[in-house]
Image (cartoon, rainbow, N blue to C red):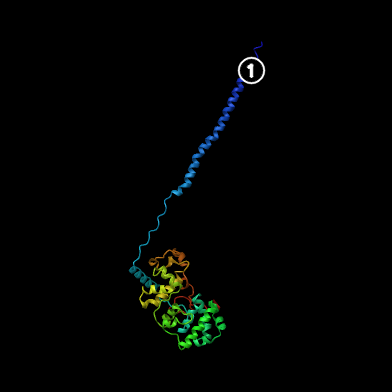
Amino acid sequence: MTETPAKPTAKKTATKTATKTTTAARKTTAEKAPAKKTAAAKPAAAKKTTAKKAPAKAPAKKAAPARKPESRVAMVRRARRINRELAELYPYAHPELDFGNPFELLVATVLSAQTTDLRVNQTTPRLFAVCPTPEDMAAIPPEQLEELIRPTGFFRAKAKSLIGLSTALRDRFGGEVPGRLEDLVTLPGVGRKTANVVLGNAFGVPGITVDTHFGRLARRFGWTTAQDAEKVEADVAEIFPKSEWTMLSHRVVFHGRRVCHSRKPACGACPVAPLCPSYGEGETDPERAKKLLKYELGGQPGQRLKPPADYPGQPALPLAAS
């Protein structure tokens, strides 16, 4: 009778032991499950890392091949061909300052420093109505002259130069503009650029006019590497025959103002692009390049109020109407 209750106790103990074993097994299974996910996630992470690093293994781009050195003979031939191409493009090239005589051209060229030819052309009609001769300009009060030329900028310095050169013309040259470079450069405010403009266009004496446009294009075309205007003039003079100097100057300046601009040249619309070693400095897309063209090439008025009869564009407007 005393040993009978012992059997249920053994059963309970066995049941508890089995329950603990089952619970422990479940916990072990639950703990192992995340480990499997983590293990499965590692290859994916490794793949992502590999994918990110892939671009670094891409081969580097090959550098563009260097241009072959150009011989002097080849450069001269190319330069002269550019001149012929520009002559076909601008058969109407001309000085873009309005003038009726050498004195007016001399004054207009002095006024053109640090401003546009258009602004000079808009200013000189009133100026020449008051001062048509060197004697008149030498005698005008400085304040009155400054007011007349104010729209061109730097009017005080320019007024001083104009009175000085007019006085020199009156006193040393009989009121006439001299036709020699060595005489012109002795006048106040007159340098080689101004002298060559006057000689080439008022006296028919060949000269190369090196303004900002001409210097920029001469370097882009590979005609010179010089920055100094006189050195540029000397380098270009060795390339072209003297008979071409004046018209070459007009053509290059025309091209610099209309196509080969300082900041964004219209390379894609440039007819001499195949001959230019600087092609690609500007816009190369033809359609976008066309939108950069200026003056008559861009369907806009030119710089002269009284352009030559063969000029294909529209005359500029007077100062009051612009």
Image height of 226 relative to 25, above or below: below
Label 1: few (<14), some (14–19) or many (≥20) C-alpha neighbours in 10 Å: few
For mark 1, what is the residue? 9
From this viewpoint, which residue is outermost toward the right? Answer: 2
Residue drawn at x 48%, y 85% is 168
Image height of 322 relative to 268, above or below: below
From this viewpoint, which residue is outermost toward the left? Answer: 73
Quadrant in the picture for the N terminus = top right
Is residue 132 shown left or right of residue 70?
right
**Can residue 309 be seen from the camera position used here?**
no
- Three-letter amino acid code of the residue under disc 1: Thr
Image height of 209 relative to 13, above or below: below
From the top left corner, tell me how far across and down residue 156 is, in percent.
55, 79
Q: Nearer the viewer, residue 82 or 113?
A: 113
**Can residue 288 be seen from the camera position used here?**
yes
Query: Does dot 1 land on a helix, a strand or a loop?
Result: helix
From the top left corner, tell me how far across and down residue 72 is, in percent.
34, 68
From this viewpoint, which residue is outermost toward the bottom? Answer: 174
Quadrant in the picture for the C terminus = bottom right
Q: Quadrant of residue 207?
A: bottom left
Labels in figure, total: 1
Q: Nearer the viewer, residue 258 or 308?
A: 258
Q: Quadrant of residue 280?
A: bottom left
From the top left corner, tell me how far across and down residue 79 is, in percent.
37, 70
From this viewpoint, which residue is outermost toward the top? Answer: 1
From the top left corner, tell me how far across and down residue 56 is, in percent.
45, 49
Is residue 283 shown left or right of residue 18?
left
